[in-house]
Image (cartoon, helix red, strand yellow):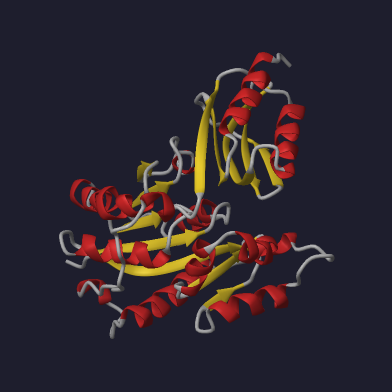
Amino acid sequence: MGKIKLEIVSGFLGAGKTTLINKLLREAWQGEKTAVLENEFGEIGVDGDLLAGRDLTVKEITNGCICCTLKGDFVEGIKELARDYGPERIVIEPTGIGKLSDILEACGLAGREAPVSVYTAMTVAQAPLVSAFLEVSGEFYHEQIKSAPVVVLSAVQNLSAGGPSLPEILGKVRELNPGAAVFTEPWDTLDSLKLLAVAEEMTGNILGAEDPHRHEHGGEHKHNHEHEHDHSLENGGFDSCSFILKDPWAGEDVDELAARMKGGSFGEIFRAKGFVPVRGQPRKLDYVYGRLSLVPSDYPGVGKLVVIGRGIKKEELARYMGNIARRRP
């Protein structure tokens, strides 16, 4: 019997990893026994709820030093899913604040103790923000692109006439990783089976596999990684805070919060995500570096919001969130 396939979908904050995983589950992995390992940066998990309703097992690992998570909970999570669920594949969605090379190393460690092996690895990058994130995001963004056998650009349909063009964005990706396969199609026309076929081939080349059934051999990615260091530096200065939202919001509350985050009132906010009870109707909130999306959701639970950034003014943000809660729409 072959080993369980590990499929890694990495990418920086708000890149669209969960959306791509849902697309692959729907179009390419349907009918196969699949588990998902979510590694989230923050005290509250959100992405796991976006996969709810599908016939699969989702395990979430939230909060904690990226380094320690990779050495401990992350590896144990893979082993637990392999042992208790016995899937054909485990889809891994790492935190946006993590290195793909570290994820590959952790998968190699798990492969020593469980019947698993990396099959595909890819990085998702939001096209309209590639140029900005190359400037402000730090090493995680650069490393995720440099280490990826395949780069999948998201939101290419949202590129504006006044911003960088698709050829310019593609050029920046190529500068970091000349050998990667890069997919630039809008996702409504992106061929999932083709994407996976290319990712399988490219990942096999990087891991040094010689045949298409490399999951029988357990190829392992190795690199020197020093863990004797200050863990506060491991996260590149990024921090998070989370909120439970029991009281209903007005639509203008969401717009005002987004405007304040974009304006720097609460520090440098890169990402906010969650489910907001807007006038009794849950909405899925996605905020990525100044860009806000708010869409209806059938999420049944209590509202929740995770905010990720650098130099977050937590007391000011908590006070502001409390003021919103005291308003009644």
Depth order, front residue of 204/139: 139
Q: Which quadrant of the rendered structure holds the C terminus?
A: top right
Instruction: Give coordinates of residue 313: x percent, y percent.
Output: 60, 36
Residue at figure coordinates x 22%, y 63% from the top left? 109
Q: Which quadrant of the rendered structure holds the N terminus?
A: bottom left
Horizontal placement of 53 versus 162: left or right?
left
Residue at figure coordinates x 21%, y 64% from the top left? 111
Depth order, front residue of 58/112: 112
Residue at figure coordinates x 57%, y 56% from the top left? 15
Which image quadrant is residue 324 in?
A: top right
Residue at figure coordinates x 29%, y 61% from the top left? 106
Horizontal placement of 76 versus 11: left or right?
left
Q: How many marks?
A: 0
- Residue 147, relative to residue 16: is it above or below? below
Depth order, front residue of 319/277: 319
Q: Mark yes or no: residue 29 visible.
A: yes
Instruction: Give coordinates of residue 159: x percent, y percent.
Output: 75, 63
Depth order, front residue of 27/305: 305
Instruction: Give coordinates of residue 51: x percent, y percent.
Output: 46, 44
Q: Mark yes or no: residue 194 visible.
A: no
Instruction: Give coordinates of residue 307: x percent, y percent.
Output: 56, 39
Horizontal placement of 173 versus 225: left or right?
right
